[in-house]
Amino acid sequence: MTRTSQAETGSTDVVVVGAGFAGLYMHHRLRAMGLMAVGIEAAGDVGGTWWWNRYPGARCDIRSLDYSYSFDADLEQEWNWSEKYATQPEILSYVNHVSDRFDLRRDIRFETRMTSARWSDSANEWTVETDHGDQWTARFLVMAVGALSAAKEPEIDDIASFNGSIVHTAKWPHEGVNFADKLVAVIGTGSSGIQSIPLIAQQARHLTVFQRTPNFAVPAQNGPLDPEMVASLKQRYREHRAEQRVSHGGVVSPSPEQSAHEVAPDERTMRFDAIWEEGMLFGFLGSFNDVMIDPSANAIVSDYLRDRIRSIVSDPATAELLCPTSYPVGAKRLCLDTGYFETFNRPNVSLVDLRSTPITRLIPNGIETTESLHEFDVIVFATGFDAMTGPLLAPEIIGKDGETLRDAWSAGPRTYLGLTSHGFPNMFMITAPGSPSVMTNMLVSIEQHVDWSSEVIAWMAEHGVQQIEPDLEAQDAWVDHVNEIANFTLFPKGNSWYLGANVPGKPRVFMPYIAGVGPYREICDGVASDNYRGFTFQ
């Protein structure tokens, strides 16, 4: 949807930045409240991360039947998913269907990027500017920019000197990439690398994978959905959605009651085998109640997964390089794969360990490491994202007293409930640091955040309140609570993007709230029922 070059100026009730799942649902809620909204979206159409991430193999790691909106009972009945884990094209088709069904595009300016937002305390409003010269004033600013939407660029010298093609998984060309008969490099083995490598290997003449840190991955065991199972779930979808909202991760699964040490080794192995064959992302981390708090229990799971890797990969040396040993399983995002480890048995695939032979620079015909030169036609950067804070800090957001959000968060993100930040009145952030966010089924967290923010706006109108801002003391207490819960677990023990460890110079702070979406919802509801405890109003 091509944007015209003519700049727009006006006033509205709310500016919503982002047109992925969060932004679209926010538009739906605001319209039902009778409020005017202007949407700003850098992409050419709706979809957010699913519009940008079109690399081969891109798919969700939450079951399709769970990774969908729950706000409309008719919508969930009429849409039919084809696979257990939907691919990017099918998810984007779903987003388009929702946008058409509820006419959500009409208030959104596509191919438009917010460059700045400035708060006026005297006028109680935000002034938002874009790269098209638009200027909008609004009482409320909603940052629905997504947690994984700012691409992490590689830290390699002389990128421009490479004469071949360069693509990034987070900014994949819409026309696709032809790897046939090409010498291809993939740099990065996080989720996007693990998903794309098997399919690229099927096309390329030779694929070389450059790995800095190996990742744990479990097979998706993907396939067509059983119509009888779908029909059965749809009969009780409302009940299932309610269970999702009070669950730990936004997916319905049994809560483990046993320690890994209370179960005999043979029984543990049987349990792990069942999880492996079922193909569930959270299965191993939730197999016992102490996997993410007891290093020795975690090691039992880690050993099982490493043995699985060794049983799949034919070459023992390659298998060992692919076995993570420097962090607990779960401390870096556990990945779902489809034939990832099997790919390294192909004769046209090789693995380069960047810990022993780092990349020094790109050269016109390939990549130079400390050990050798590698010639390539195409280089794929699967280097992930500047997660959670990156999309929020990309524009210049100026709050009270001229303080920018970048300065306020210079030592790490500071939020109250992961929804608001002191010094930035009438600004709501959807699934921001300090909320369960990326540790959960994002659709469950998104809907809860949008609902809560919308209800605040409605409450303010009912009570004649012009301005809402979290108290500094409440914010500090929440940040301390988020850190306390995280430090009780093994999650901060890996150099992961949860901590910002993948971005040089980024403060090392564990950003998500990991007590679970159910307990978090109770806290947010308690704040609201106590006349929005921890907030100051004007």
Image (cartoon, helix red, strand yellow):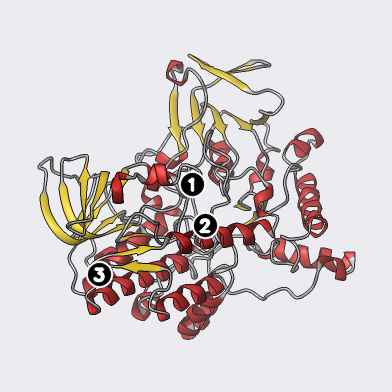
Closer to the camera, 71 or 461?
Answer: 461
Q: Residues within 10 Å of mark 3 (few under 14, many from 20)?
A: many
Q: Determine the CA span between mark 1 and mark 2.
A: 9 Å
Nearer to us in this view, 361 or 508: 508
Image quadrant where residue 373 sits: top right
Q: What type is the residue that disc 3 sits on?
A: Leu
Marks 3 and 1, Cα distance to the nearest angstrom?
27 Å
Residue at image point 40% right, 57% down: 421
Residue at 44% from the left image edge and 40% from the top image edge: 151
Above or below: residue 448 compared with residue 188: below
Spatial distance from mark 3 to mark 2, Cα to Cα? 25 Å
Query: Does the image show residue 288?
Result: yes
Residue 173: x, y in percent? 37, 38
- In the rendered structure, which amino acid carries the disc numbered 2? Val
Residue 226: name its quadrant: bottom right
Element class at badge 1: loop
User: Which badge, 1 or 2, is on the more N-terminal residue?
Assistant: 1
> Quick one: label 3 or label 2, which is nearer the N terminus?
3
Label 2: which residue?
Answer: 438
Frontmost residue, 24 versus 277: 24
**Residue holding disc 1:** 387
Of the numbered discs 3 and 1, the one sitting upstream in the chain is: 3
> Does 460 appear above or below 49?
below
| Image spot of residue 426 (x, y percent) | 29, 61
User: Callout 3: helix, strand or loop?
Assistant: helix
